[in-house]
Image: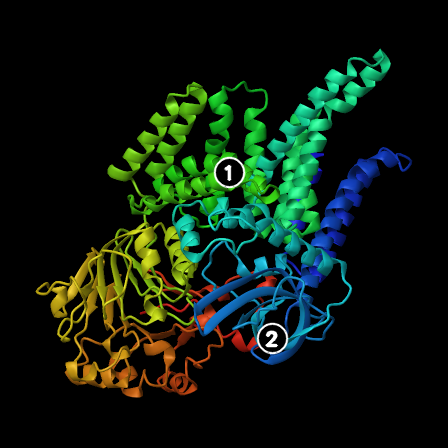
Amino acid sequence: MNLTLMGCLAALLAGTLIPMSWAALISAVFLSCVFVLALANAPDVGHLRHYIRFSLPAASIALCLMWSSAFTGAQLDHRLSPLLHGQDVALKGCVVGDVDRQTYSSLRSRARFKLVLDPNALSKKGLRNVRVSWFNAPDWLSPGVCLTGVARLKPPRSYANGLSYDYVASMLFQKIDATGYLTEGAQVTPPEHGFLRADALANQVKQAALTGLSKEAIPWVKGLVFGDKTAFDSAQWRLVRDTGTLHLLVVSGLHVSMIGAMGLLAGAIVARLLMLLATALPWATFAAGVRVVQVLPVISALAITAAYVALAGSGISLIRAWFMFAAALAIWKLPKRIRRLPLLLLAALAIMVMNPLSWTQAGFWYSFWAVAALVFFFAGRRTSRVSVLLAPQLLILFAMLPVMFYFGQAVTPVHLIANFFAIPLVTLVILPLALLSAVSPLEWVDSVLSFFNGLFWSLLEGLPELPKVDLFDSSALVLLAASIAVWIWAGRSWALPGSFTAIYLSISFLPGISPTQTPGLWVIDSGQGQAVLISDGKASALIDTGPAFSDSFSVASAAILPVMRQKGIHHLDLLVISHSDNDHSGGTSDILKSVTVDRLYVGQPLKLNSRKEQLSCHPWIGSRPQGSKAGSKADSGASVVVGSDLEIDFIRVSDDVMVNDNNQSCVVRVRWAGYSILIPGDADAKVERALIASGTDQLKSDVLVAGHHGSNSSTSSMWLKAVAPQVVVFSAGYRNRFNHPHPDVINRVEREGIPYANTATSGLIEISPDGEVTLMRARWMPHWHAKPDAERDFSLHGHVLE
């Protein structure tokens, strides 16, 4: 049975990766082979059980493969047609879920929400759901409201940096067929749909529950009880992200399990009372009643958690968490003859059948591994009271490390300390108080919740300043594993604080044995921005950090830091920010908060929430960044030695051409692995002419990152001749509003006979130490990343620098 279940799960996963025609062919070949095998093993034609023994599991696996492929294909048929990308289209639909409103000033605000659309012809099978923004949206916009309007939409598309998190798959999983923004809209009478009435009713219940609560209590009730992801402000989201406690503010399996524990306790109390009352009944009636009462805690837990899931929005992730909780509860409470592994596999199978794309979501793996770790570890094990409360937290954290590593999430001592205090505080104190506040107007409940709200944020605020060391360094992993093992197997409560003290002191202050960095140069797909990462295997540098889109989201957090972790880079020897424009400097704060940086060079002073010293890459300008130092070799425009095979040259530019922000960009020449790479930032043709006049020897480079993302104001023919690159790279956003790279620039590059690539269509561009160029989108990718023929120019893929 286990093999059949595993085969079905594997088929459901594989089916999402292949089109239906391939799934049908593979299923036919597979079933034919199984039939021949069954026929060969049957004693005679009359023994049907041999056919059944082989055929039923095989048919189940083939059915799973075809269902998964058909499901994924159906989602793609609903996706917005690429022909309508950026076009104004008429929409009619209704708001479902929470409306996230952000106010930027008294004159400008933005609302983000999900629209469920009426039948339409905007894709092969019509758009179902779109996620849109509306600037300066009217006050009447709320859950359950219907509207008609004009929107500018685009199909979901993600950065292509070879990372595990797949934004496009996430949109398919959520059945979001397009994203964009409304340009105009008007309210209309809603149709009689049950889901709209339910959504409007849920909003009314939420508003009623929030009435009279203090401003400190409202976010917890909105977030933890009603699953409102807009409950906390951007500063709070940033803090929990920096401390690794974001999962506590988003309703998940942890919260469902805690509510389930409350349900078990309530059911057990009621069962005990019923048992006392039943003693007065006749024996036969009493015996029958006992059997019913014994399952009352389980029924109570399942019912209460189901109600909680419905109250919190009934999202797919919450339904998944409920299934995994039900499986764990069944393993714990059902007779001991029930085997654990098949039940866990059945729960996972149920989740995958409902939505085969579940495997692309980190939450699926977190839920499965967490439940599996708890079930298999605690089965038949006697634990102390301290262990019952604290062992699950450590066990789950340790079990999650492989999943966190796969999805590129950082784990630091800060995260360990924060979760050690925050998990019990939120699950054992704040969550029950939030539930009480939602159903009870008692003033003392609100006051207690407000107190613990202050305590929670106070505990977190000082933690981000602690040493930033990634636990994926091998020495840190060994220490963590050893400490948890000592505590759990010692079975002594005194070992717990000792373990955490040892982890923190060892990781923070002793030299770690870091994994070897992957040497290479990577032009990261950062949209309409720029970020170039270089490593010689021991030392590393980052040139620019891409844009930031809000206080809680930047290219640095979404792409640059995960790429760094993937390449084993947990420390930067040098960070260069060419100039202050957001598309080059937006992620600087996130980088400085997440990794240690030895030296920071800037083209213009940056406004940072950091005391990091800013050194100027061209101090001959009249103004100098606050705290920068003059007189060093780098400060005079010479080279900075970063590593044994990595040096950075800051090329001096004449003062008279540095008249605007773009022309104050650091002009950087990287010398690495025997190659040279020129990165001029956003400098225009005036700077190019001035540098050519100063002499071309300092400009000759093997790779040129085109200035200003390929703007027509840069990368002149004279510049291309002076630099004489073997390869030109454009770092630009897909279908960006600036039309970068400009067609005239492309023509100039082609006239010089220079091969080129654009991150917008090629994704991350990697150059290995032996000079081989790799384009991320030229590699195999799931078919939901299918590229139009016009974007299939991957001629630079496999090119080798001389």
- Identified at 42% across, 48% down, the residue is 240
Q: Nearer the viewer, residue 378 or 138?
A: 138
Whole-number angstrom distance, CA of label 2 to CA of label 1:
56 Å
Q: Secondary structure at mark 1?
A: helix
Is residue 734 placed above or below 509 in the rendered structure?
A: below
Instruction: Please provide percent x and percent y for residue 454.
Output: 40, 43
Residue type (three-letter) at the residue carrying disc 2: Pro
- At label 1, the amino acid type is Trp
Judging from the image, what secondary structure is the residue with disc 2 in? Answer: helix
Q: Indicate the quadrant containing the C terminus: top left, top right, bottom left or bottom right.
A: bottom left
Q: Is residue 442 visible?
A: yes
Residue shown at 41%/21% (left/top)?
493
Tell me which colouring the rendered structure shows: rainbow
Neighbourhood count class around disc 2 (C-alpha, 10 Å): few under 14, some 14–19, many 20 upward: few
| Label ID, residue 444 | 1
Residue that label 2 marks: 82
Q: In the rendered image, which quarter is residue 50 located in? A: top right
Examine the image and state in which quarter residue 198 appears: bottom right
Along the horizontal axis of the image, is 477 left or right of 44? left
Residue farthest to the left?
631
Find the residue positioned furthest to the right.
Answer: 46
* Percent position of residue 627, x then y: 15, 61
Which one is in front, 553 or 475? Answer: 553
Q: Quadrant of the N terminus?
A: top right
In the image, residue 796 sits, relative to residue 393, either above or below, namely below
Mark with earlier residue (2, 1): 2
Number of other residues with Cα within 10 Å of mark 1, as a class: few under 14, some 14 to 19, many 20 or more? few
How far from the left and from the top, in percent, is residue 433? 53, 38
Q: Is residue 14 visible?
A: no
